[in-house]
Amino acid sequence: MKIESIKAHLQPYSIMKKSQTTINHAFASAIAPHDAYDIKTLKAAMAVLGQDAEIDLLCVYCDEPAETWDHVFGLVRNLKFSGYGHVVGNLLPCCKKCNSEKGNRDWEDFLKKKMPSNSAKKIENLKRYFEKYLPKKFDYEEIKTLCPDEINQLNVIKDRIKALFKEADVLAEAVREKIKKA
Ligand SMILES: [Zn+2]
């Protein structure tokens, strides 16, 4: 670790800045469709990935033991619902390291970088997996046309929450100033 990394901690904490990503993610996640839990479908899906679901699953990117599920296509894009939900085809067994390294990067680029010599078969499996289990992307504009009132109200609520957090930041700054002077 480099000494400069402490810099991020030596500055005022903003409730609004720290929560913005969480708020956007929560509102996008809440309207995202999801698949039902069905173990038969899941086992078949893991077989497409070349994995044996009877034993512990492995990270699709590096073959280490999987610890979490990667949403291959992020739920939020440009602060809005991306069109990809909590469906089997959008979830891949993944280790924590790869999950955080990949972030919102393209899965194919990430895989090629991670396993340059061994990626062809994996890419083939993954393409079959998406074909079979990833439904067509929902179009946000279409969703807005389908439920204009609800989407509009959700955006109003989201803006209200952000405005409240901004208000809280101003108050917190006042407290910090008073503590400094005390
Ligand atoms: Zn991994």
Image: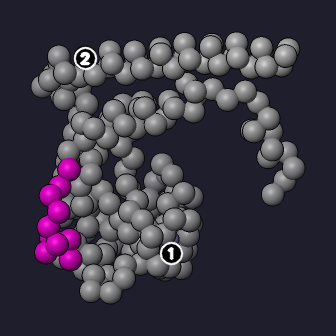
User: Which quarter of the image is occupied by the N terminus?
Assistant: bottom right
**Residue beneath disc 1:** 62
Residue 152 occupies quadrant: top left
In this orientation, which residue lies closer to the viewer: 123 or 45? 45
Give the amino acid at mark 2. Answer: Gln
Residue 87 in the image: x percent, y percent? 23, 55
Residue beneath disc 2 = 153
**Foreground tag (2 vs 1):** 2
Region of the chain picked out in magenta, as a range: 34-43
In the rendered structure, which amino acid carries the disc numbered 1? Cys
- In magenta stretch: residue 39: yes
The reply, left or right, for residue 36 in relation to residue 168 is left
Q: Can residue 115 be spotted in the picture?
A: yes
Q: Mark 2 or mark 1, which has the lower sequence index? A: 1
Label 1: state its secondary structure: loop
Q: Residue at x 36, y 43 (%)?
A: 75
Question: Is the residue at mark 1 in contact range of ligand 1, meaning its CB lies under 8 Å from it?
Answer: yes
Could you tell me how far apart the alpha carbons at marks 2 and 1 are, in whole angstroms? 43 Å
